[in-house]
Every structure is written in structure tokens, then in C-alpha cells.
Image (tube, rainbow, N blue to C red):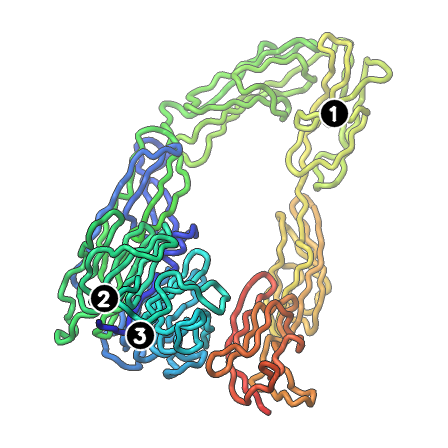
Amino acid sequence: MTRTLPILCLLFGYQSLAQCGYPTYSASLATNKDHCIGSSLIVSSLHALQKIIWYKDGVAVNTVTGTSSFTQTPKIVAGGHGQGTNNNQFFPSDVAVDQAGDLYVADVNADRVLKFTPGSSSGTIVAGGNGRGNGANQLSGPAGICLDNSGNLYIADNGNQRIQKWAPGGAAGLTVAGQHGLGTGPDHLRDPRDVYIDCNGDMYIPDGNSDRVLKWTPGATTGTVVIGQNSNYTLNDPLQYPLRVGMDPAGNIYVGEGYEGGRLQQFAPGATTGTILGTTNFEPTGLWVDGAGNIFICGNSSDKVLEWSPGSTSWQTIISANWKPHDTFIAPAYYGLAFDNKGNLYLGDEDYSADECFRHTSCDSAYTPTAPGIYSATVIDWNGDTAKTGPFVINTPFSGPPPAISIIATATSVPVCVPITFTATPVNPGVNAAYQWQVSGVNVGDGSLTYTNNLFANGDNVLCILNTDTGCSATPVTVTSNIINLSIDPQGHPTITITATDTAVCAGTPIVFTAAVMNTAANPGYDWLVNGVSIGDNTNTYTDSIPAGSQAVYCLIASDASCGLAKSNTIPVTIYPLPTVVPNQVFNIPYGKREKIDPVITGDIQTYAWTPAGGLSDTTVRDPIANPTATTTYILSVTSYGGCTAAGPITVNIYTPLGLPNAFTPNGDGHNDIFYVRGGPTGSVIKQFAVFNRWGQPIFQVHDAAPGDPAYGWNGYFHGSPATPGTYVYIVEMQFPGGAHQVYKGTVVLIR
């Protein structure tokens, strides 16, 4: 049985995220013309699509399936310059691709991981590269790599029997599994070849020489054997030298093995006995399971890439070519397999390169509706991941003249209580027309083409509004009719007239409405209405701080007329919204720095005024440059359209920048005895502060602590005894005000 140093991990950003319900990409709809029948709807997405399901009013009406093929001649996208330590050289054991199209290559011989941006000829080291070793900043034979949603890099550090988590831009990694030496116990790893992360953040690790797959939950110090056993290799083991591991959306686990030339097994959720999927005739040193459950493998003794689709009975060859243009004397071997969001296939090539086999895809992204309705589409890319578009309205185009509406009345000058009927006549209203009658700005009626009432005031005006479908436009069509003004003769019946102290005020400013009544009893009953809704105030005055917006106020009184009521004139009022300065805003600026402050304010602001003026570049703008010499609380006053004002305190906190010493002396003399996080903006939180020895063993940890407090620092002891003098690695994860996170890494020297 051949036991080589491979390879792969499922790329969390393209598989697990979609399977776990996280959005990994988007799609949108547009038309080649407008919103009318005859226009074609077109799907746009940055991902290459293999299926589009079209919906009308929520019901599927059409499904389009694309076609694809792979070029049989590879393109070198990284490396190809032989094995070495230059950043354009590597010996690949695994590859992965992130959402931005950046390629990651695990370099097993140089003990590092390189990152290649699209089109670059040279990579950058993102993990390791500090010589072979077991320090937190070192690797030893990295066999597999994996990315999570935050860009953290997980590495199966085979030579150190551990899994390392490497944050973006980090100078050192954090051990998240293993590193207790060779062994078969639950806290040991003997031969980790790969790592896969499921929806819960659990890691699945194939432990080659222990013939098992372990599940390691976040933060755990031990793993659980989910497949295999804690024994050495035997022919009767359910697993025989597991190399790769993956999972499909249904929770089935797939394990590639190095047994007798190689095989791949499927294990149902919770099962300990698997099903062998066909014959591969090579060790699967690259494994990929996409969001549709399709399985792809490559091997270290074959130039083929095979695919197994759900329901298949055998493997299908999708790549079969003599891919050895670089060195015809080297036997074919591929370590690592990944797809990007275009469906392009990447392989780690033993010829010290990463090859890209472009996927040629074709999927008709256009659909021409034949009936009006609300359309949308569900799309599936070539990795099996799904996205949904937003809705798009398709209407029947207007024919003839544009929509219009006019109204007539049975009378415009009548005695009080005489009914008047208004009739609307629309022109070309469309198929989804709606009608709204208004009397002096107040909505009335039942939405029909006629409106009848006998309760009007002298001077009332009546109109009708037509709202129709969008036609070929993206916005609704609203048409207002002519206005009919009414002359109502009270003829000695009670009449009511109202006045207001103001008709345009800021929200919260009271307006007093007063009713004057003629020809009625000594104690009439009053009913005040705002926008046609009774507020139930039975007095001749009404005072209220009306909510922002346009309002219409009128009053009704009991009457001895045949209609039983008398209606006042209607007073339209405008209420301007109040601006706000969000309270308790703090801006943190390092001492001696000049930074722009941009407070959170709402409203249509016309003027700004800051006090005091000291330390600000301009007191009349929203976002001045601030550089006070000490922490200062300013008062920001703002005035919005309509003359409405607001004010609030804005604090500029001057702080000492975050810092950690590069050495400390825990000798009890009261000077530099504690290694702790110093400085930092007010409101910062140390989410994690950890110190590791040269072997990556955690020496000290603290969580959710305040910076600047020695009580949350390391005193130089480990397990109650003085720690050995020397260099230690630290990791600090800070959460700053506003929720931003930042990770800091470095070394500190303990001196005694």
C-alpha cells in the first residue's frame, strides 16, 4: 500500500456555507427592454450557473439546465518553477480557493501555505515559512488546508500531529486539535491528513495511521471517533488508512482511503459501516463534495478526475488527458482538488505547479414572459449552491392614450344635508386599477367609481386618484382627477368653522384648533377628526402634537338638520420631523492624531453648530477633523428643514494606543512584573488573550476582559511554578466600540 503525503480539504466558503444556509453569492433580474410583455428577463450572477428555475407569482413555469465541459489541456496558474523556497515555487499537498478567487497552496516540503491572487506570478506566505518545527509560527509537513467564512485557515499539520487555525494576516497559528504527541487516545492525532468543518463548526479529521475519523467540537481538548477505531491498520477495519474526508448536504460522510490502491466510502449519518463507491484504482488524494451532492476525486497515481453524481452506479471520467507538458518523465500525481465560484477546477500537480482546468459552461439566462405577473428565479451554480433573485413585475403595455381620470358631480352648490354623488370616468386605466376619493385631503369612499355623501362643509373640495399598474415603467402610475369645489348653504342650520394657531410646525409642537359654532344649542357635542379618524375630544378646542407628515383636521357637531351633523371646514397642516443626534456617541482617537468624526444624525439637516470650538477644524460641518489634547465632550446642535432643532453630546476620547511590551521581568519588584494588554479605546474588550510556549502549548488565557488592567495579565507562572525564561508567542483578539474585531500576534521575552 502506497502512503504518500497528500492533500485536500473541502473549501468551507463554497460548500459548507451554502449547505448550512449562509448566502455565498447573489443573483439579480433585469430586462433587455422594460417591464412589459415582450421584454426578456435576464439573470445576472458572478457565479457560473448550471440551472435556472423561473417562477411566475410563486409557481414554477420553466426550468433551464446548462451544459459544461472541461478543457483537457491545463493552464498553470501558480508555480511551475520547480521545488524550492522562492514564492513562485512549491511542492503541493493541497489547494483551496476563496470567494475572491485567491488560490491557496499547501507547500509540504517548505512547511508553509502560499496565497496567489488571480493573475499573480508569485505568492505570499500566509502560514508557516519559518522553518520546520512545532512552534506556533511553524509547520511540519502540512497535508491539507481549509478556509472558514471568516477567512481563517485550518491546516492539517501532519508532522506535528495537530490542526492549526491561522487567522488572516496572523503571524502564528492556534492549535485547535491534537499536539499531544503520537498516539491513539481521544486527545491525540497520529497522522492527520485533512480537516473538514460542518455547519456547527465541528471538525472532522481523518487520522491515517490510526484508521479512524475523529470529530472535534470547537474549544474541545479531545475528539470523538465517529468512524473507524483506535487501532493500527488491519484488513478488517471499517477504515483503512483514511486520507480525505467530506460531507454532503444530507450529512453523509465521504472518506478517501489509501487501502490497496485506494477507495472511497460513503457513511450515512451515525453509521460506522460504509458503502464503497465503485472502483477508483488510485488513492483519492483530492476530494470535493459540492452543494448538489456530486463527488469529485483525483489521485496520486492517475491523471484523471472522476465524478460520482447522486444515483450513479459508477464513476464518470471528466478529465482524462496526459497532463504532463512540464516534465514527461514524472509519473502523474495530483494532490488537492478545488473548484472556484465559476466552476473552474484547480489541481495541485506533482510537477510543482497548480493547474486550472477551465470549465466551459452554457446556460440560457434569458426568459421571455408571455403573461403579466411577478417573476423571480432560483439559480444553482456548478458547485450546487443555490441563490434566489428578487421579484420583477411584468405588465401588459398600455395601448392608446395614457391613463387619465375625470370626475363630475350631481351638484356643486346645494343646501346643507343634500346628498351629492360624484362619478369618475377613467381613460385607459389598465388591468389593476385602484381608485381613491378625497374630500379636502381626507381619504373617503369604498374604492368604487362613485362616491355619495350628504355631509359637506362650505368650501370642501373633492377629487379622485387613479393608481394603475406599472405598464412599461418600473414605478406605479398615479393620476389625479380634476377638483370640484363645493358651495354649501347652511340655510339657518347649525354651522361650524375651525381655526388653528399654526399650520406648519415641528413634530412635538402643540397646535390648538378652535371651533366656532352658529345656530346651534348652548351645549353642542364636538367630534374632532384627524385624517378622517375620530380622536374623541368633546370640547370646542383640540390641542395635540400631531405626528410628522401631512395631516387634515376637521370637526363635526350634532345638528338639528336632517343629516344630524354639521361638518366644519378642513385645515391641512404640515408637521416637520424632528432631527436627532443619537445619544452617547464616543469617537476614540489616539493621542496626537487627527481624525475625522462622523456622528450619527437623522433628518434633513440644514445647519450644524459645535461647541466648544477647541480641537475642531470647523464647527459648522457635520464631520470636522478632531485633534483635542484631552478627552472632550462637545455639544452638537443641528437645525433641519422647517426650523426644527436637536442637540446632543459627542465625546472625543483621547487614548493611549493599544500596546504590549516585548519583554517583562516577573521578579516582584513592582516594575514590569505583569505582561498585559495596555491602552486601547474606551469600551474595548479583550475577547481572547493567550500566551503559548515554543511548542505551541497554551500557558495563559483570559477572555472578555478590559484592557489596561494588570489583573487580566500573565504573571510569568505556569501551573503554579515560575515559567522558564525565554521567548513566548501571544495572540490578542480585541473587540472595539462599534463591534469591530482585530487580532494581534507577536512574541514576548520573559526575563528573570
Q: Identity of the amino acid at label 1?
A: Trp
Determine the image quadrant of residue 583. bottom right
Helix, strand or loop at label 1? It is: strand
For mark 2, give the secondary structure.
loop
The quarter holding residue 491 reads: top right
Specify the quadrant that holds the C terminus: bottom right
Q: Which of marks 1 and 2 precedes in the sequence? A: 2
**Which badge, 2 or 3, is on the more N-terminal residue?**
3
Q: How many marks?
A: 3
Q: Vertically, is 32 above or below 10?
A: above
Task: From this view, report whether residue 243 is shown above or below residue 382.
Answer: below
- Reading the image, the residue beneath label 1 is 528
Q: Is residue 104 left or right of residue 677?
A: left
Q: Nearer the viewer, mark 2 or mark 3?
A: 2
Q: Decide if residue 359 is on the left or right side of residue 582.
A: left
Identify which amino acid the numbered label 3 is placed on: Ser
Residue assigned mark 2: 283
Q: State which quarter of the image contains the N terminus.
A: bottom left
How crowded pointer 3 is (Cα within 10 Å; few <14, some 14-19, many 20+) is rated as some
Q: Nearer the viewer, mark 2 or mark 1?
A: 2
User: In the image, residue 316 lies at what x, y percent?
Assistant: 19, 54
How many neighbours does mark 2 have within 10 angstroms: few (below 14), some (14-19), or many (20 or more)? many
Residue 122, numbered circle: 3
Pick the front one: 265 or 200: 265
Q: Callout 2, which amino acid?
A: Glu
Q: How packed is label 1: few (under 14 Cα within 10 Å), some, or many (20 or more)? A: many
Q: Does 486 sit above or below residue 221?
A: above
